[in-house]
Amino acid sequence: MTAQERIQRLEQSVNRLIDDIERLPADVLYRAPSPGEWPVMSTLAHLAELLPYWAHQAQDIARQPGKPFGRTHDDPDRIGAVEQHGRDSLDVAVKRIQAGLEECVRLLRALPAEAWATAGQHPNRGSMTVEQLVDAFLVKHAEEHAVQIQTSVKSLAAAGG
């Protein structure tokens, strides 16, 4: 898969997710599908934050190969975005996701071809190239959250609401 194909796949996945969530009834956005799971809006807050975050990380690796990058699940910015924006309106969430996607795509398209093969050191996964980062933390991550949201909505519907 080329860099451009990765970017297009990410754009398509996020735009499809936006189309899907804009059709959801408001009452399912803020309820956890089961104890300990994020409500749909919390997942959307996380998505809006992760798109530019990981694109900036890719840019940093391209500028300084071999340096540490990334974060773990307990990162305060990751958690803070969910806490700060998990109760946003759907309209605000969609605008934040769209802005995050635009920033992400702009940064990724600005990377020179050779940057995609440069590597940095992730705290848990070790050495990763920009290509691997984009695949794991952007493309697949966005797709996983789309499935998570679909599963949450089905779970809430099955539970009677």
Image (spheres, helix red, strand yellow):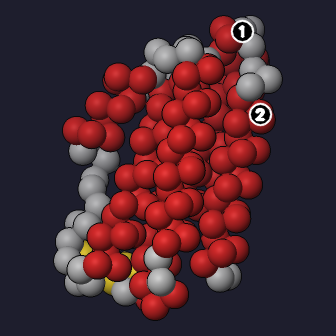
Residues at marks 2 and 1 touching, judged by CB atoms closer than 8 Å: no
Q: Is residue 139 left or right of residue 56?
A: right
- The disc labelled 2 sits on which kind of residue? Asp
Residue on which the image places disc 2: 20
Q: Is residue 73 left or right of residue 155?
A: left
Q: Residue 39: x and y, percent? A: 53, 23
Which corner quadrant of the image does residue 21 belong to?
A: top right
Taking the spot 69% from the left edge, 74% from the top edge, the residue there is 5
Q: Residue 85: x and y, percent? A: 42, 23
Q: Is residue 92 above or below residue 138?
A: above
Element assignment for label 1: loop
Q: Nearer the viewer, mark 2 or mark 1?
A: 2
**Does residue 34 appear in the picture of this structure?**
no
Question: Callout 2: few (<14), some (14-19), or many (20+) C-alpha neighbours within 10 Å?
Answer: few
Question: Callout 1: few (<14), some (14-19), or many (20+) C-alpha neighbours within 10 Å?
Answer: few
Taking the spot 70% from the left edge, 63% from the top edge, the residue there is 9
Which callout, 2 or 1, points at the residue further toward the start of the chain? 2
Taking the spot 54% from the left edge, 41% from the top edge, the residue there is 99
Residue on which the image places disc 1: 161
Q: Is residue 26 above or below residue 91?
A: above
Distance CA(mark 2)–CA(mark 1): 18 Å
